[in-house]
Image (cartoon, rainbow, N blue to C red):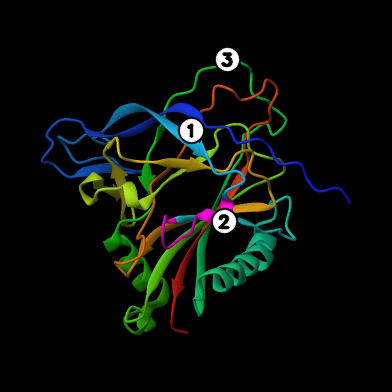
Amino acid sequence: MAAAVLPAPHDVSTTLNYYKPLGDPSEEAYRYIYLTPPAGRLEHNLGEDPHPVVVHDARGREAEFSLDVHGFQFLAHESAETEFEDEERIKGVYYKEVEELLKNVTGAKRVVVFDHTIRRHKDKDMTVPRNVARGPERVHIDQTYEATIKRVHQLLGADAPRLLQSRVRLINVWRPIAHPVFHRPLAVSDWRTLDARDLVPVQYYYPDRTGATFSVRYNPAHRWWYLGQQTPGEVTLIKCYDSETDPARLTPHSAFWDSATPEGAPHRQSIELRALLFDEE
């Protein structure tokens, strides 16, 4: 069988949407989800600060990137699941595949996949028209440090204090579904180019709980990467938390618009799993 022909690397000049406050900059950043804000509060106070960036293509250089140095990693990984239509099969088959993958890659002894998100256009056959503008995407990290610890307690209960004595990581596993990604690829930023002052905790208020993510202030030092035409046989690992402070602790990420997306390219479909990793059983 002939070897697969890889696409030539394609760096993209695009726009990413960073954080700026709406109103009083000393007020906490927040958003209410399915919940009416208290009197005097907006639904959210998250402003938009779009900036031009270059997203560099890692195609052909995949092995150069690692979770502990950069905060992200690209891997070839085939799955027995291809459609991702059946929730029970996703949890019964794909979760287990990802658990084994993460153990093998990171050396973690225990992996707890706790949720997943599938993103696909309502009309899966709809293709991308040419020269249609798209708004900039928001740069973020899925959990703050404190929110990750809270998540461990929520999921592991009485076992949480013991597990929190070991190394704890939160890693997202992002995979295209059905076809390579042309429309709205995923960009990840090198941890080494991030300043701690760039991170802005955002409180998310739900009817039954409060969560928190990081939004990100613009910094011209940020260096962005993606895997050009990433296929369903490839995954991007995204670190969102690490209890150890010497390695990369997280990576900002965002979808982005590529003006060179071919006419007729299918809309992106993807699945993203979130997992807690522990160095103790």
Depth order, front residue of 7/242: 7
Image: 149 above or below 40: below
As helix, strand or loop, the secondary structure at mark 3 comes to: loop
Which of pointers 2 and 3 indicates the residue nearer the eye? 2
Tag 2 near tag 1, CB within 8 Å:
no
- Does the image show residue 237? no
How far is disc 2 from disc 1 in space, using C-alphas? 23 Å
Which secondary structure dominates the residues rendered in magenta? loop
- Residue farthest along the right direction in this orientation: 1
The part of the chain drawn in magenta is 62-71
Give, as a three-letter code, the residue at label 2: Ala
Residue denoted by label 1? 256
Residue denoted by label 3? 131
Q: Please give the name of the residue rendered at 66% of the width and 67% of the height, measured from the top-left corner.
A: 92
Of labels 2 and 3, earlier in sequence is 2
Left or right, 148 with respect to 12, comes to: left
Of labels 3 and 1, earlier in sequence is 3
On the image, the x and y values in percent for residue 29 come to 22, 42
Give, as a three-letter code, the residue at label 3: Asn
State which quadrant residue 37 falls in. Answer: top left
On the image, the x and y values in percent for residue 278 come to 44, 76
How far is disc 2 from disc 3 in space, using C-alphas? 34 Å
- Is residue 70 part of the magenta span, yes or no? yes
Image: 54 above or below 150: above
How many numbered discs? 3
Depth order, front residue of 61/253: 61
Left or right, 66 with respect to 128, comes to: left
Of labels 2 and 1, earlier in sequence is 2
Q: Please give the name of the residue rendered at 32% of the width and 47% of the height, measured from the top-left corner.
A: 193
Give the label on residue 271, or none. none
How far is disc 3 from disc 1 in space, using C-alphas? 15 Å
Residue denoted by label 2? 63
